[in-house]
Image (tube, helix red, strand yellow):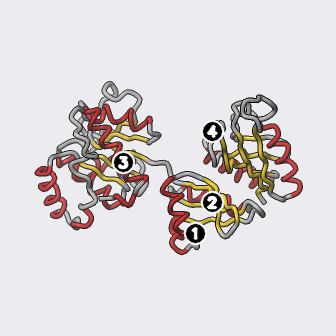
């Protein structure tokens, strides 16, 4: 099972070697009850296939959309997710946490 | 991230060597610093701290936000002696996230009934550590718990030679003095054998096997997170 972050980095390298466009997303900062710790990875290819997790499912869809752009453009970007009002449940992390995610292309 | 950087990071991990990937958040510029190269790095103190904590995170340096991806090999605990203390120690160690192996050549002790679901090697330490058990390295802790010099001594010698980050041995001060004499005869220097923690475990007055197990694991955690307290 590909679950640990280390397996995900191996998968990212393997995908790249196979000639796929690859982006790596990494949780770089968390506040509150963020579901995944700093350093968690998600690897995405140009077709939107992915492995790993940066939020346990809450914001993966948005990260994947951005990752596909990053694969096309090549410039890394930092995404921020969460609820401004910690009592509100809106789009984002329903747990009330906030996270910042770095998305970079594997060249 | 350049593919070569990713491959190099993966290669360090496969070799069970620590490394830190430094990423400038603003422009994505990156460099991989292997454990061997940290001393020469301008961020050496920060990188050392990050490695000791084992956690990735952001730092500020020269007004730039840098993300440190910290990669530390998974820590393994090798327990020599399938004894009563080990029965308490193994599940506690597993709950700390340590990969545990128990070695004991005495099959009556090293039985799956006594250690269900545990990686158990019924062999002498020399044979076990050069075969079924992965080679010891500095990300291994070794606890020698048999009280039997024929079993404990070779395991301790192997752990010292491999530079394990923690080496502990059960036994009183008197037992340990005799052990040190034997290890000296076997060619180990005083500086080397001084790394053995004995009597094993933090001094918390532990009496029962589970209490001794807690004292041992607390000492292992201390050696891992506060390497400066090393014996």
- Classify residue A95 as left or right of residue B222: right
User: CA separation, marks 4 and 1?
Assistant: 31 Å
Chain holding disc 2: B
Give the spatial CA distance, label 4 vs label 3: 27 Å
Image x and y of residue A24, in percent = 74, 51
Residue A3: which disc?
4
Q: Percent x, y for residue B2?
A: 74, 62
Label 2 CA crowd tier, 10 Å (few <14, some 14–19, many 20+): some
Q: Quadrant of the C terminus of chain B?
A: bottom left
Residue ID for mark 2: B59
Q: Chain of mark 3?
A: B
Position in image of residue A86 (x %, y %): 72, 34
Q: Could you confirm whether marks 4 and 3 are on the same chain?
A: no
Query: Do the residues marked 2 and 1 share a common chain?
Result: yes
Residue A99, by quadrant, is: top right
The chain that hosts pointer 1 is B
Kindly identify the residue that appears in the image at 80 percent across and 54 percent down. Answer: A77
Circle 2/circle 1 CB separation < 8 Å: yes
In front: mark 4 or mark 1?
1
Q: Secondary structure at mark 3?
A: helix
Which-is-in-front pick, marks 2 and 1?
A: 2
How crowded is the residue under tag 1: few (<14 C-alpha within 10 Å), some, or many (20+)? few
Respond whether the residues carrying marks 3 and 2 are from the same subunit: yes
Label drawn at residue B220 = 3
């Amino acid at each position: 099972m590909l679950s640990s972050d280390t397996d995900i980095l191996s998968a990212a390298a393997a995908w790249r070697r196979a000639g796929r466009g690859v982006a790596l997303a990494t949780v770089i900062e968390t506040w509150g009850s963020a579901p995944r710790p700093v350093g968690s990875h998600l690897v995405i290819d140009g077709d939107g296939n992915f492995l790993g997790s940066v939020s346990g499912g809450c914001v993966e869809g948005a990260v994947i959309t951005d990752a596909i752009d990053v694969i096309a453009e090549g410039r890394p970007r930092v995404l921020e997710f969460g609820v401004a009002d910690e009592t509100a449940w809106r789009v984002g992390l329903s747990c009330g946490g906030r996270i910042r995610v770095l998305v970079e292309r594997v060249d | 991230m350049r593919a070569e950087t990713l491959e190099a990071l993966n290669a360090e991990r496969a070799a069970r060597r620590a490394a830190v990937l430094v990423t400038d958040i603003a422009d994505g510029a990156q460099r991989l610093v292997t454990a061997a190269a940290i001393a020469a790095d301008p961020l050496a103190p920060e990188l050392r701290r990050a490695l000791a904590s084992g956690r990735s995170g952001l730092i500020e340096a020269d007004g730039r936000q840098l993300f440190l991806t910290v990669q530390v090999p998974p820590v393994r605990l090798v327990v020599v002696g399938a004894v009563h203390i080990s029965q308490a120690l193994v599940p506690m160690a597993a709950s700390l996230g340590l990969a545990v192996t128990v070695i004991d050549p005495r099959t009556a002790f090293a039985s799956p009934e006594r250690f269900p679901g545990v990686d158990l090697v019924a062999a002498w330490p020399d044979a076990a550590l050069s075969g079924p058990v992965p080679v010891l390295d500095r990300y291994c802790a070794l606890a020698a718990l048999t009280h039997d010099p024929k079993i404990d001594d070779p395991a301790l010698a192997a752990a010292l030679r491999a530079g394990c980050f923690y080496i502990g041995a059960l036994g009183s001060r008197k037992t340990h003095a005799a052990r040190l004499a034997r290890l000296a005869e076997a060619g180990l220097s005083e500086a080397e054998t001084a790394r053995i923690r004995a009597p094993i475990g933090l001094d918390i007055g532990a009496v029962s096997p589970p209490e001794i197990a807690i004292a041992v694991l607390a000492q292992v955690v201390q050696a891992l997170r506060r390497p400066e307290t090393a014996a």
